[in-house]
Image (cartoon, grey):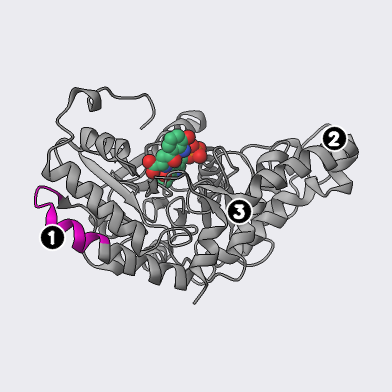
Amino acid sequence: MPDFTATKSRFHLPQGVTYLDGNSLGPLPRAAADRMGRVMQDEWGEMLITGWNKAGWMAQPGVLGDRIGRLIGAEPGHVMLGDTLSIKVYQALAAALSLRPGRRVILSDTGNFPTDLYMAEGLIKMLGQGHELRCVAPEEVEDAITEEVAALMLTEVDYRTGRRHDMPHLTQKAHAVGALAIWDLAHSAGAVPVDVAGGKADFAVGCTYKFLNGGPGAPAFIYVAPRHAEATAPALSGWLGHAAPFEFEQTYRAAPGVARMRVGTPPVLAMASLEAALDIWDGVEMAQVYARAQTLSERFIQGIEATCPMLTLASPRDPDQRGSQVSFRFAHGYEAMQACIAHGVIGDFRAPDIMRFGITPLYLDEGDIDRAIEVVTKVMVQELWDDDTYRHRSAVT
Ligand SMILES: Cc1ncc(COP(=O)(O)O)c(C=O)c1O
Ligand SMILES: Nc1c(O)cccc1C(=O)C[C@H](N)C(=O)O
């Protein structure tokens, strides 16, 4: 079992705050500021443009991609970092559609995160070939996998409820009808054990600012299965995905393998902070993190259900069906979450009525869970949320 006291000590956690929102933005790794400072001063400051070679900036998207690859069960050399997750969704979907030219349906579910669906809508318009985005309820996905489907595009762990799809099973169903499977691992990477290679995912994408703790705006990642690596036509044919970027050729030639999913200049400073965050994952096995998350989640659910009958569990009761978050429904969830935050417990709210709590064992322990139960109970039982201060909605929730 990893030493979770040691991993916790590697994060800066503000005094008086219990942080259960690492499923949206992970906290600051203590080493990140120093690492970023060193990249700024010793590399950018001293090396100037030679840093691209001398400090290895240009290779970082693949190097860090492999470190993330270990956490999602990818074969080495098949994960690339860069851009935002929305962009990576677009690239993966465009690649999948180009591999299934005779089919017109993109199958997703109504629980998917909106940007994935918006990117699909935009791509469909851009292609102008009559594709259809078909969204069904999460539990109806399996039956909706038909021979019309070109690409199954799902987020493994539902951002609102934490419900987890059976990735290998649905992927196998997709393959059985000749479709490809794209998995958004935003709420899986660093949260649950994932095996993209074993589960035969065709494409996978994810972000690094949630459970991986890379920092706000940290770059996204994309996995392309080795069997597709040389066959995918990049929709975003940027110069750094070219086979020979510094030949400055007139026309595009795709780089070998997943390198063709690079687009433009990598975010060197953001990668420095992500690198410090990934150091904490070294030697940590996902199965152990998930087992610990299940223990902490059970403790949280039991504690809240014992004291807060007005909250209804929105996450699956079976721990194996959940990601690494626990959600409850409450009609005044927004105000209640604001009141929890004002009393030192940070979770978040997702419309229309979900109070969401991220369970992140790298820096949360039983004491944090018990304190969160205590504060949520106080807010709910004493109806502290019923106060005008908590009704004003912020732009970002
Ligand atoms: C499943 C999922 N996909 C995509 C995104 C967003 O992607 P981006 O990093 O482009 O903002 C999120 C969260 O913001 C998400 O939860
Ligand atoms: N990416 C975010 C952002 O830029 C601002 C605020 C929140 C986010 C999030 O990550 C939201 C998150 N995907 C969610 O599950 O709700």
Residue for point 54% across, 53% down: 11
Ligand 2 within 8 angstroms of badge 2 C-beta: no
Residue 337 seen = yes
Going from N to C along the chain, the mark reached first, 3 or 1, is 3
Q: Which mark is residue 306?
A: 1
Q: Amino acid at mark 1?
A: Ala
Furthest residue in direction left, as rendered = 309
Direction from residue 267 to residue 139 in the image, left or right: left
Q: Residue 270: x and y, percent?
A: 65, 41
Helix, strand, or loop for circle 3? helix
Q: Residue 268: x and y, percent?
A: 72, 40
Q: Which mark is residue 45?
A: 2
Query: What's the magenta region?
Result: 300-311
Direction from residue 91 to residue 39 in the image, left or right: right
Which image quarter: residue 132?
top left
Mark 3 surroundings within 10 Å by alpha-carbon count, few (fewer than 14), some (14 through 19), many (20 or more) = many
Going from N to C along the chain, the mark reached first, 1 or 2, is 2
User: Mark 3 = which residue?
Assistant: 277
Q: Residue 194: x and y, percent?
A: 47, 65
Q: Nearer the viewer, residue 117 or 25?
A: 25
Q: Which mark is residue 170?
A: none
Going from N to C along the chain, the mark reached first, 3 or 2, is 2
Would you place residue 64 above or below residue 110 in this image? below
Q: CA distance from mark 3 to mark 2?
A: 23 Å
Label total for image: 3
Q: Nearer the viewer, residue 154 or 394?
A: 394
Mark 2 surroundings within 10 Å by alpha-carbon count, few (fewer than 14), some (14 through 19), many (20 or more) = few
Helix, strand, or loop for circle 1? helix
Residue 116 seen = no
Direction from residue 252 to residue 188 in the image, left or right: left
Q: CA distance from mark 3 to mark 1?
A: 36 Å
